[in-house]
Image (tube, rainbow, N blue to C red):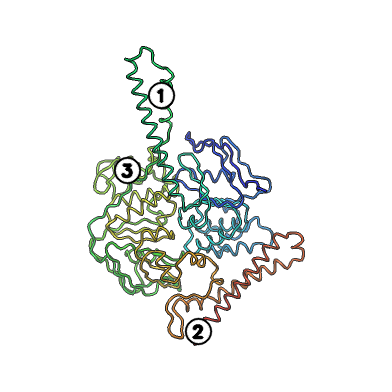
Amino acid sequence: MARAPLLQLTGISLTFGGNPVFDDLSLTVQPGDRVALVGRNGSGKSTLMKVMAGLVEPDRGEVIVPVGTTVGYMEQDPDLSGFATLGEFAAAGLPLGEDYRVAMAAEGLKFDPDRPVATASGGERRRAALARLLAQAPELMLLDEPTNHLDIEAIGWLEEQLSDSRTAFVLISHDRAFLRRLTRATLWIDRGEVRRQERGFDGFEEWREATWAAEDEARHKLDRKIKAEGRWAVEGISARRKRNQGRVRALAALRAERAGQIRRQGTAAMALESGTQSGKRVIEAKGISKAFGDRVILHPFDLRVQRGDRIAFVGPNGAGKTTLIKMLTGEIAPDTGTVAHGTNLEVAVFDQARAAIDDTVSLWDALTGDPAMRVSGRSDQVMVRGQPKHVIAYLKDFLFDDAQARAPVGSLSGGEKARLLLARIMARPSNLLVLDEPTNDLDIETLDLLQDILGDYDGTVLLVSHDRDFIDRVADTTVAMEGDGRAVVYAGGWTDYRAQRGEDAPEADAAEARPAAARPAPARGAPGRGGLSFTERHRLESLPDVIARLEAEIARLTDFLADPQLFATAPAKFAKASAALAERQQALAAAEEEWLALAERAEA
């Protein structure tokens, strides 16, 4: 027997500022659906998700959620007012005794539940909102860019949670690897129309190109028909005193149909121009280290950067990736060691915090107020790679329209702010490009274009990113910040790095996402005879903390299940908690066995 849809949209129409976002939109989300929601920045993805969540009221149409169905939405900017800590916010609404769910999610997503809301960063707030949604376990989850502000380890953990869950979800993300692994259907928003394909994101680009090719062919046929009918209308005057008025009306209808077609938005006209060629040696770092108080960010480390290198820096949030890059570029000094720069360096920086943009100024002033772009005596032009260009024309290159030029930067979406910062960077020549989290908020088409531009760029690129697919496409060297101040250089991109650590193949992705205690003993590195590799020694040192955490979780679950009335009053909760307890007991046994095996080898 077919189950009722979890969510149904019927005849939805919505207009913002006089412009239609959707018109007569209908779609359904079924139990078990795993849907990628894709489209250009500004196409209405987040708006559609808010309509699904009941947060935006459509002008017309119905949003139908069956009685008893729970729908959860992850907010981009969650409101934590009224809560003292992140954990208190994440546990709000959970039944008494089930806050262990928040503790488990907080560990996987890497935030401190005891962190006061007043001192929490935007990324920590978003992670708390995601933990809240996962802990509530609704029947349908609406996830808007959940991987933003997550490091690669946390993304892997989230992938595993969603992969194992029976919950249906609709997912917006720029992370191709994340979308490919998790989705089974695709909703594509394009010029106000929403199309659906019963295939995951892996087939999206092929589907998109086929759709656009068919659209171009239909437009070409329509243009030829209009041209032929138009010729008849003109030539027929001399041949006939009375023209066929039906054909004239049909021609008018064809022209109206053609005029009503919405043209596809072009890609941003982005370009990078290398400045004066740098020396062959760009950066030479020898023995550099850094610590803040008792916390070691980097043990003595050597790195040689040559002209044309594309180096990606990967690792958990807080591991020191940005700090290392700032030492390499001379923004901060290392505690020990030396950093030597080659000749003729011209550096351009894409800042993770978008600090180079003042939210209070207009887009116009953000460009004309930049000293590097200012044209003497002209307030309506900017200098773009050595040539003056009108501000509006340059903004249009980056897909901004006339109306946005005088709007404040603060009114832009995250993706639009990223495009504006790219516009500033790409206006000036450079030969060393520093990209700190450039992929956050950019749509997939813009990421494709950025990748192509970097491929043609003659300069050197230093890249910090948690986007595994983008790293694979761009980087030829990967510097992994592996914790405790260790930085290791690997040849190639993300997949090559994983392979060199013995973690290649899709199965390894799943292994990386599993809780550490549930993994088999690592086989990375080359252990000395009768001893342990560097990675295995680190694993041996970290396992006691893993074991202690699992023991604490087992104790919390045991206390929860100790209630004699629980099975009778809440059998579903009893079953879930029992399954979680069994999982953690199994993980604990595996961790203890792994520790014993490594300890015996270390003694030998």
Q: Measuring from the top left, give residue 73's x and y in whole percent.
A: 57, 50
**Residue 228, above or below 194:** above
Amino acid bearing label 3: Tyr
61 to the left or right of 290: right
In the foreground, 496 or 67: 496
N-term mark: 2 or 1: 1
Question: Dot 1: what SS?
Answer: helix
Q: Measuring from the top left, give residue 23's x and y in whole percent.
A: 52, 36
Q: Are marks 2 and 3 in contact (CB under 8 Å)?
A: no
Amino acid bearing label 1: Leu
Q: Which residue is depicted at the point 38% across and 33% down?
A: 221
Give the CA distance from mark 1 to mark 3. 38 Å
24 to the left or right of 407: right
Give the CA distance from mark 2 to mark 3. 63 Å
Instruction: Write down the residue under mark 1.
Output: 251
Instruction: Write down the residue under mark 2.
Output: 601
Specify few, some or many for label 3: CA neighbours under 10 Å numbering under 14, 14-19, or 20 or more.
many
Q: Measuring from the top left, give residue 248's x and y in whole percent.
A: 41, 20
Give the CA distance from mark 2 to mark 1. 85 Å
